[in-house]
Image (cartoon, helix red, strand yellow):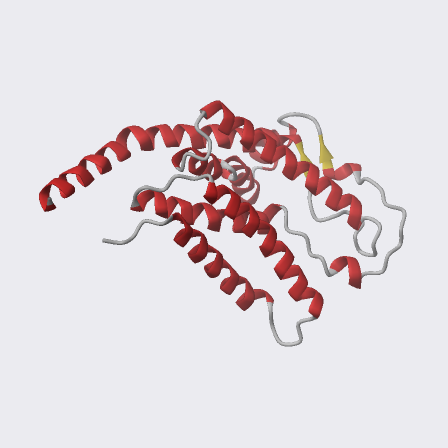
Amino acid sequence: MLNINKWYSLLAASLLYFIYTCRTVLFEGVRFLDYVNLIVNFGLILLLSIWLISKSTVTNRIEQFISFFLVLYLYVLHSLVTSVYIPYYFTQKYLGNHFVHVDQINLIPFKTIFSDLFVIAVPVTILQTLGNLLLLSPLAFALLSLGVIGKKYKVILVTFLTSLFIEIFQFFVNYSVSGYEYGYEGPHAVDIDDLILNTTGGVIGVLFFMIYKKMFMKKFKTFTRQKINYFS
């Protein structure tokens, strides 16, 4: 039998993502700052992953796979929504005069959702809406599955706060790059609809966990118990 150890998942997922990132980001002629960028961004998520895994409970292979998935998911999520390209601040000309680009901010609930689904309504906007809806669902599911958080309402609250942090973080990234050459618009849009979609996705993750716990885990525990009785 394979030894069940939650730290194996952390090691495997971190190593897999680090190798993938090195192969895709580091190339001939890469600069020292690119190594710094890789280490800082990777290191921050590694610390977060260590903290979450230390609080998790892994007792079987399914939970071990979920813990592996959680760590890998955190790296991918960071690369999509909160990664900062550090060399930009050292290689681009600093102009000063930071400002807020109001065209990239939406504080009207459901404005972007309605526009993306019913006004523009092209595949890319529909997929973007669906992506924002499901963005934090895996986080909610994994936190409950691994016992990091026991209460469902707390998981939904954590999902909301995570989404809020992402939007605020992206706002400050936009503000910081606005003072540099070619940083006029910033890399992210700040949208209250993302907060709505992400939090709804947390609810979806909780519902999926309830289905998983009721239907799948009971069968798995019954199968495991029968297997132990057979070999005992």
Q: Is residue 3 left or right of residue 45?
A: left
Residue 150, percent from left and from top: 43, 28
- Please tell me which residue lies in front, 3 or 108: 3
Position of residue 213 in the picture relative to residue 117 (left or right): left
- The number of discs equals 0
At which x and y percent is residue 172? 75, 42
Tell me the quarter of the picture where residue 225 sits. top left
Residue shown at the point (11%, 40%) measured from the top left:
229
Q: Nearer the viewer, residue 181 or 32?
A: 32
Give above or below for 7 relative to 229. below
Position of the C terminus, as image quadrant, is: top left
Residue placed most toward the observer, 22 or 193: 22
Task: Specify whether 88 is left or right of 39.
Answer: right
Q: Residue furthest bottom?
A: 28
Residue at the top extreme of this rendering: 153
Q: Is residue 194 visible?
A: no
- Extreme front residue here? 232
Residue 39: % across, % down: 62, 60
Q: Residue at x 58, y 29 (%)?
A: 160
Relative to 204, say whether 127 is above or below.
Answer: below
Residue at x-position 45% and y-position 52%? 10
Q: Which is nearer the eye, 131 or 3?
A: 3
The residue lying at 70 percent from left, 49 percent from top is 187
Could one spot residue 48 in this view of the protein? Answer: yes
Quarter of the image holding residue 24?
A: bottom right
What x and y, as percent, mark residue 59? 32, 41
